[in-house]
């Protein structure tokens, strides 16, 4: 019987197991046969609901998850296709979604994606026309269209979240973006990878406190010494491996029993996660055979009743790290998290100046708004808006924001920082999962633009706005036109009817 991921995660008390497979750059051969073999055995074993297939992981080219997933569906397994925003624009993404619907592949994990890696002739163009929130919204709108045309099977869209953020700004920005993903239509969540049970639990408590009620699957990774080093060094976006864990893994491999310990570790973590209320696990890092998957699941069955005994070994207890719900315990022990990140002198003035200018000139409810609209309309009719742009808007915005002249300004959504010049992935709805200790995944010497936005807004108790309603994508047709005029003439993304074409 064919498995159905949607049915399995929607059944209360069902503990779902999914398996992540990573296609390589080959179109046939031993490695691919091994992946297919694992998928076939997963179906025969019966405990895996679906395989999930990565989309050019690390930004490097690989066999398409759509092609491989289509083949695997025929084995009887359900498939979750990873769908990133890095490689194609909105036209390509919608076309890919239509193709997936046509092929009967409706489970999507919508991701902003790692930054572009190396392809033929060098680094690929980082497209990022959408972020993951907009992608989820697009798939949701496509669902409406499918329903209207009589289709009963529609996309089941999930999203990722990384609870493994150890500064206040990164943690809260992640969680607030998760709220936006759910508002946009995400129906399940898969966490990023880590081994810190307090962080796993933090996510569940946050969800409970904010009425987030969708199934959450925890990523579990068979941690070998090869991947452990780059993961510990922050080289794998969104993943956290502590120094202690790295040392443990290295010594286990030195003793010749590394793999045995790795299997035991994820089995123990798996039962603790089930115990604290996760709806399932998402297994990764298993590339050799299904046998390893079977061993993890068998061991989980054996030790499940004792899950509380294993909880402590996954507690990191680093007082230098931020935990949203552990503050009072730490304070009792005299250990208080101290924020490490300091914004530059002048950041607050920059924020206040731009926010005030925005309130005066770019608020449709401002007293003078009708006058600005009249001026904009007259400049537009006389074809003289270029003069405003050339002599006033461009010099001001280039100086203040390194403006990229996109003509559809989004600074008001990012603490009055530019999502085009400030974020290599042009995110408008919240941070990607790749920041590391507050710094950007791509430009490691710069603070993530959302971390800066958070602290700028926190000073004025305005961080709730980071979870406020969905920010539509920028309109490329406005490139190199005046964003000021576009705003007043209701041409930009903020006009009410501009959510989708
Ligand atoms: S600025 Fe932040 S959101 Fe943008 S790519 Fe860097 S880490 Fe990701």
Image: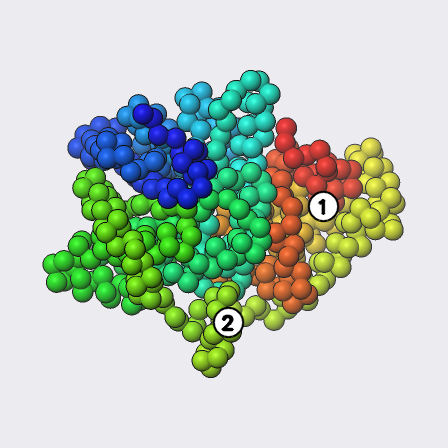
Quick one: 118 or 36, which is closer to the camera?
36
Look at 67% across and 52% down and name the residue there.
412
Look at 62% across and 40% down and name the residue there.
472
Task: For label 2, count other residues whose C-alpha is less than 10 Å away and answer few (under 14), some (14-19) or many (20+).
Answer: some
> Which residue was labeled with disc 2?
327
Q: Within 8 Å of ligand 1, the CB of disc 1?
A: no
Percent coordinates x, y for residue 463 in the rendering: 63, 59
Pointer 2 with pointer 1, Cβ within 8 A: no
Q: Quadrant of the N terminus?
A: top left
- Taking the image as shown, residue 353 lies to the left or right of residue 95, namely right
Percent coordinates x, y for residue 293 in the rendering: 23, 43
Mark 2 and mark 1 lie on one chain; the one further toward the N terminus is 2
Q: Quadrant of residue 482?
A: top right
Circle 2 sits in a helix, a strand or a loop, which is it? helix
| Vertical position of residue 11 compared to residue 348: above or below | above
> Which residue was labeled with disc 1?
390
Look at 55% across and 49% down and name the residue there.
212
């Amino acid at each position: 019987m064919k498995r159905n991921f949607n049915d399995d995660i929607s059944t209360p008390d069902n503990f779902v197991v999914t398996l992540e497979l990573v296609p390589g750059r080959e179109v046939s051969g031993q490695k691919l046969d091994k992946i297919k073999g694992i998928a076939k055995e997963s179906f025969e074993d019966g405990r895996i609901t679906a395989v999930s297939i990565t989309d050019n992981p690390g930004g490097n080219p690989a066999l398409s998850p759509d092609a491989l997933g289509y083949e695997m569906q025929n084995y009887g397994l359900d498939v979750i296709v990873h769908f990133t925003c890095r490689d194609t624009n909105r036209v390509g993404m919608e076309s890919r979604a239509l193709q997936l619907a046509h092929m009967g592949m409706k489970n999507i994990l919508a991701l902003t994606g790692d930054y572009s890696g190396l392809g033929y002739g060098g680094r690929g163009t980082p497209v990022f026309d959408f972020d993951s929130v907009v992608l989820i919204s697009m798939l949701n709108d496509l669902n409406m269209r499918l329903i209207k045309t009589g289709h009963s099977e529609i996309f089941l869209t999930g999203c990722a979240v990384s609870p493994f953020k150890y500064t206040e700004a990164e943690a809260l920005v992640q969680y607030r973006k998760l709220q936006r993903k759910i508002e946009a239509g995400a129906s399940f969540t898969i966490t990023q990878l880590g081994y810190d049970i307090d962080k796993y639990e933090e996510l569940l408590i946050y969800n409970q406190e904010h009425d987030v009620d969708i199934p959450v699957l925890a990523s579990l990774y068979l941690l070998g010494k090869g991947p452990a080093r780059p993961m510990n060094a922050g080289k794998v976006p969104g993943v956290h491996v502590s120094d202690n864990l790295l040392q443990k893994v290295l010594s286990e491999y030195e003793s010749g029993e590394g793999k045995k310990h790795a299997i035991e570790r994820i089995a123990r973590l798996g039962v603790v996660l089930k115990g604290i209320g996760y709806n399932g696990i998402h297994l990764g890092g298993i590339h050799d055979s299904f046998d390893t998957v079977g061993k993890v699941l068998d061991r989980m069955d054996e030790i499940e009743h004792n899950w509380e005994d294993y909880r402590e070994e996954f507690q990191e207890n680093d007082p230098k790290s931020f935990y949203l719900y552990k503050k009072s315990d730490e304070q009792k022990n005299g250990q208080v998290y101290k924020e490490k990140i300091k914004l530059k002198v002048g950041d607050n003035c920059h924020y206040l100046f731009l926010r005030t200018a925005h309130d005066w000139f770019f608020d449709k409810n401002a007293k003078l708004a009708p006058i600005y609209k009249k001026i904009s309309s007259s400049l537009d009719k006389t074809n003289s808006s270029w003069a405003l742009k050339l002599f006033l808007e461009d010099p001001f915005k280039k100086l203040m924001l390194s403006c990229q002249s996109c003509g559809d300004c989004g600074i008001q959504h990012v603490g009055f920082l530019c999502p085009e010049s400030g974020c290599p992935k042009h995110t408008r709805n919240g941070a990607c999962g790749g920041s590391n200790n507050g710094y950007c995944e791509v430009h490691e010497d710069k603070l993530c633009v959302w971390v800066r936005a958070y602290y700028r807004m926190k000073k004025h108790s305005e961080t709730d706005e980071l979870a406020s309603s969905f920010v539509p994508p920028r309109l490329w047709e406005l490139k190199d036109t005046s964003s000021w005029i576009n705003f007043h003439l209701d041409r930009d993304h903020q006009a009410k009817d501009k959510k989708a074409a």
